[in-house]
Amino acid sequence: MKEQLDTLRRLAGVRQNRVREMLGRVNYQRGLCQRYRNNITGLTRLCGFVVPVSTSLQRGNQQQYKVTLFKMLALQKRELEVAEQTLARIQGELLQAMRGEKVLEQVIETRMQQWQAQLASQEQKLQDGLAAQTWWRGQGI
C-alpha cells in the first residue's frame, strides 16, 4: 500500500509540474495577445494621422505608407485571432490537467485513508491480542 501511495505521489508531482508549465504557457499567450492588441491600437492611430502634402511625390509616399500600415494592421489582426485561438486551446488543456490533478489528489487521499484504517485495524488486533494474553496470564491458566 505504501508503494502505491509513493507512486501516486510521484504521479501527482508530475501532474503538478504539467499544470505549472501550462499556467506559464497561458500567461505567455495572454501577454502575446495583449501585445497584438497594443500593436493594433497603435497602427490604427497611425492610419488616422493626416499630414498636409504639397507635391505628388509626397502624396505618393503618404499613400504607400498608409497601404503598408493597413497591411500591417491586417496582419496583426490575423495574428491576434490565431493567438486567441491558441490561448483558448491552451486554457482548455489547462482545465483538463487541473481536473486530472484534482482527481488524483482525491485518489491519493482515499488511499491514504484506507491505509490508515488498515494500520489502525492491525494496531487494534495487536492491542486485543496483548490484552487477551495479559488476561489469560492473570487468570493463571
Image (cartoon, rainbow, N blue to C red):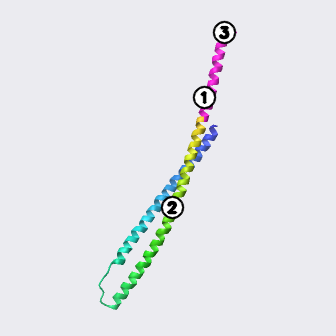
Q: How many marks?
A: 3
| Residues shaded magenta | 114-141
Q: Label 1 amino acid? A: Ala
Q: Residue furthest bottom?
A: 56
Q: Earlier in the sequence, mark 2 or mark 3?
A: 2
Read off the residue under disc 3.
139
> Residue 76's mark?
none
Tell me where residue 91 appears, x and y as whole percent: 51, 58
Q: Residue 96 vs residue 141: left or right?
A: left
Residue depicted at x 30% and y 82%: 51
Observer-nearest residue: 7 or 51?
51
Q: Quadrant of residue 136?
A: top right
Read off the residue under disc 2.
88
Q: Nearer the viewer, mark 2 or mark 3?
A: 2
Q: Nearer the viewer, mark 1 or mark 2?
A: 2
Quadrant containing the N terminus is: top right
Tell me where residue 123 appears, x and y as whole percent: 62, 26
Q: Earlier in the sequence, mark 1 or mark 3?
A: 1
Observer-nearest residue: 35 or 17?
35
Read off the residue under disc 1.
120
Q: Earlier in the sequence, mark 1 or mark 2?
A: 2
